[in-house]
Amino acid sequence: MVKQNTAIKRKKKGYIERLESRNGLFIIPFLLVWCVFSIWPIIKTITISFHDYKGFGKMTWVGLDNYARAMGDSVWWGSFWTTWELWLPNIIVQLGLAMILTMIFSDLKYHMKGLHVWRAIYYLPGLIAITTVSRLFQEILNKEYGIINRLLFDWGLNTGAPIDWLGNVDYAHWCVSLLQAWLWFGNSFIMLMASVQGVPKEYYEAASIDGANRWQVYAHITIPTIKPILLYIVITSTIGGLQLFDMCYLVGTYTGNPYRTLLTMVLNQWAYAFRYRQMGYASALAVVLFFIILFFSVLSYALMYGGNKKKEA
Amino acid sequence: MKKTIVYTLLYLFLGLCALICLVPFYFMIINMTRTGQEIMMGFTFLPGTNLVNNWNKLIEMGIDLFGSMARSAFIAITTTFLGCYFSALTAYTFAFYKFPGSNVLFTALIAFMMVPSNLGMFGLYDVCNQLGIINTFWPLIIPSIAQIGTVFFLRQYCVAMIPKSMLEAPRIDGASEIRIFHSIVLPVMVPGIATVGIGMFIGGWNQYMGPLILISDPDKYLVTQVISILNATRDISQNQGVVYLCLALSVAPILLMFAFFSKYFISSITAGAFKE
């Protein structure tokens, strides 16, 4: 009887297995498209990076010349630092604001109403296309007739010449950086809030019974719980920030005006590829950027999971 | 007493943050009803009377706004449907079938998520050139079939929502596997698909870099491209009101969707972060 059962089971299992291996064919469309539009382009980029190539015509093998050139290129190094300069104020403001809002909404004593309405409002800027946002702020920050300059003048805060916010070396990168924060803080806030809401209520109740004050609750319950999400936000923001392109291109064109203060790494690549027609050099820069991003991804994953393991042990 | 003051201060802070988010859009809406001259003179908090005029001017100037919006809508809708269907199918396959190399492949895909899209950018341009599909919508539509992040999310969703026993009854009844997918798995996955679908639609409508590289024919420009060259047209700088009207029209579809599906928007944000 038992033998018979296992025999049936084995037979059934064999049938399912055959079925399963045949239905693996369902992923073929995915694989095909993935290979043509993801893998092939990447192989292509890497190949081009070893060549002198205009984007059309003949490819000439130059070995590692493009990479050597990148290391000694002061414009590239400039774009490297610019990218970080644009990212840093953004992440500080964005996360700071998101943290403050999360604290307000998760407070034990004060219960703020209408979370889903506030949340929707804060998320609104992130929904709008970067092109629209850039055009809108080019109007708002315009030197001659922009609303900001008009207000500063009307309120007597700036009686001198109107400020060219996006055309001035001192202000342009701050404007772009803060605009990035404006775009993304709602997004960060929603993620932080979602992770706080995942904390069992009992923790907070127990803490308040034990007489813990607000800051102790933050330090020992809230912050440790949201730490993985905090790290996640920082990682995705770094990876995204290192690839910042559209707003800088829309505000400062392909040269990253004013005076290259908005020339990010990807914008620099774009200019080489499609304006100066040096596809080989642009591709080499893309590969270099990939390794930079890989380095930071691995580092942050190590911080994230390495830290957790230590705590468990 | 103290409590009231703190509450007031907190709500003031929340209100201030909300103001910062909303005021630019308010300016946009106010200024689309005013003439260029009025806008240059200063601004008010009250709408002007020039909306119809701006609209007529927009039509008159021959800005390809509505054509580009139609093209953007077409691309956003097709990529959303293709992306949702094929991601769900792939996710289902990875969740329920063991085929040779399935584990290796899945691990490779997860590792591949770390590769930034920027790496393939120039290669993609070159590949599309070779295939002769530059200046067509194919390279904007077809890649939506292979979205690893979406597949990963939906696979987790599949595993969590669909017990394997659910597939056994129809199998015994002799239903084909693709039929099981269509009539049993897909309906169960709808909330998860809606979550990722909304993100796809927004991404499709808002995309800029892809079209910038791949579409250079002005007759095929998407809405983001048309918006980005608004300031390049000489006579439009004389008329700021029309610029604001164009901006407002270009975000209207997204805001409408947001008004109706904000629940799915919020869950689509957290979808990426809470994978495990």
Image (cartoon, coloured by chain):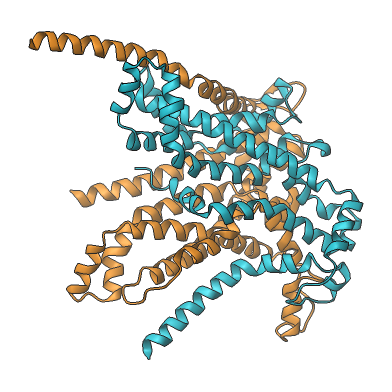
Chain colours: A orange, B cyan
Quadrant of the image occupied by residue B79: top right
Which is nearer the eye, A4 or B203?
Answer: A4
Residue drawn 63% across and 41% down? B204
Which is nearer the eye, A79 or B104?
Answer: B104
Q: Quadrant of the N terminus of chain A?
A: top left
Seen as rendered, the residue at the extreme front is: B173
Q: Is residue A5 above or below residue A31?
A: above
Report whether A49 appears left or right of B177.
Answer: right
Which is nearer the eye, B131 or B63?
Answer: B63
Which is nearer the eye, A39 or A4?
Answer: A4
Percent x, y of residue A191? 43, 56
Q: Is residue A171 above or below residue B215?
A: below
Residue A313 in view here: yes
Percent x, y of residue B36? 86, 67
Q: Is residue B136 above or below residue A165?
A: above
Quadrant of the image occupied by residue A181: bottom right
